Amino acid sequence: MTALTLDSVNLHYGAAQALRNVSVTARPAAITSVLGRNGVGKSSLMRAVVGSHRISEGAIRIGETELGKSPPYARARLGLGYVPQGREIFPLLSVRENLLTGYAPLKPQDRSIPETIFTLFPVLKSMLKRRGGDLSGGQQQQLAIGRALTTRPKVLLLDEPTEGIQPSIIKDIGRALQFLRDDMGMTILLVEQYLDFCREISDHIYVMDRGEIVHEGPASDLDDPQVKRHLMV
Ligand SMILES: Nc1ncnc2c1ncn2[C@@H]1O[C@H](COP(=O)(O)OP(=O)(O)O)[C@@H](O)[C@H]1O
Ligand SMILES: [Mg+2]
């Protein structure tokens, strides 16, 4: 059971500061959501954790291990799985080949496709030979989650998994995340703009505005007008 902790994290793009003193804890066997409008720094938070953009100050830990300057593959080996915004499926590779790209950080003896992926998303099994680019947006999102699960992560990060996806598949994704939490004890951190989805599945929420955490509490806080105000365009 592994927690993910961000402790007073700052992140810059040149002179522009995208994260200000961000402290977030994602507990084991729980779904933690960070909500915020476009441009508030949600993807920057994900990049800080996966190590694709270095932080200027603060600390990020998986369990007891501080990530420091470790590269993304080392973080994947520590148990971090990542579903990027926009899915980043390889359109010309088959569904099966897309799943296999998830093996990159793994040692050869750890390389096998977990059956859980097909239990959660049966459509992927029936489409193994189809090209990634031929899948619908929702199917691609399921594939992106499946690819992240090939490393058998302890901590799963998802960047706006509901973006541009039809309601029936959003429900499937919500159920899948609840299964990973309840039956596998996974630590799940998602960033989202979609309130209803987060209210339904999250255990704990944070609200972000202009690079800062402005609220923290249970998911029911999303009904609070004061909290909602930060999320309105
Ligand atoms: N690679 C980058 N270079 C410079 N500025 C960036 C870069 N990526 C994001 N930003 C800026 O950082 C801020 C936060 O962006 P981002 O983390 O993508 O927000 P969100 O995911 O919440 O929409 C925005 O002002 C955005 O313009
Ligand atoms: Mg984003």
Image (tube, helix red, strand yellow):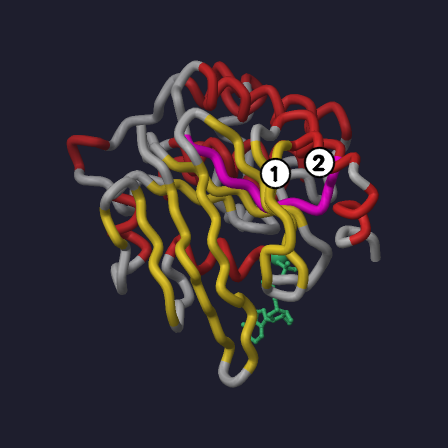
Residue shown at 43%/61% (left/top)? 8
Q: Position of residue 30 (x, y in %)?
A: 48, 28
**Does label 1 point to a residue whose CB lies under 8 Å from ligand 1?**
no
Q: Is residue 224 left or right of residue 40?
A: right
Q: Nearer the viewer, residue 185 or 85?
A: 185
Rounded to the nearest angstrom, the CA distance separating label 1 from label 2 is: 6 Å
Residue 185 on the magenta segment: no
Does the image show residue 54?
A: no
Does the image show residue 102?
A: yes
Residue shown at 43%/63% (left/top)? 9
Residue 28 occupies which quadrant of the picture?
top left
Q: Position of residue 111 (x, y in %)?
A: 25, 32
- Give the residue number, with chain letter if any, for mark 2: 221
Q: Label 2 is placed on what type of residue?
A: Asp
Give above or below for 123 relative to 226.
above
Residue shown at 39%/73% (left/top)? 56
Residue shown at 36%/37% (left/top)? 3
Q: Residues within 10 Å of mark 1 (few under 14, many from 20)?
A: few
Contact between marks 1 and 2 (CB within 8 A): the answer is yes
Q: Which residues are magenta?
A: 187-195
Q: Residues within 10 Å of mark 2 (few under 14, many from 20)?
A: some
Q: Position of residue 223 (x, y in %)?
A: 79, 35
At numbered mark 1, what does the secondary structure look like: helix, strand or loop?
A: strand
At numbered mark 2, what does the secondary structure look like: helix, strand or loop?
A: helix
Q: Quadrant of ligand 2?
A: bottom right
Give above or below for 44 relative to 188.
below
Q: Is residue 214 left or right of residue 113?
A: right
Q: Position of residue 142 (x, y in %)?
A: 57, 32
Q: Looking at the rendering, in which quadrant would you find the C terminus?
A: bottom right
- Give the residue number, with chain letter if any, for mark 1: 217
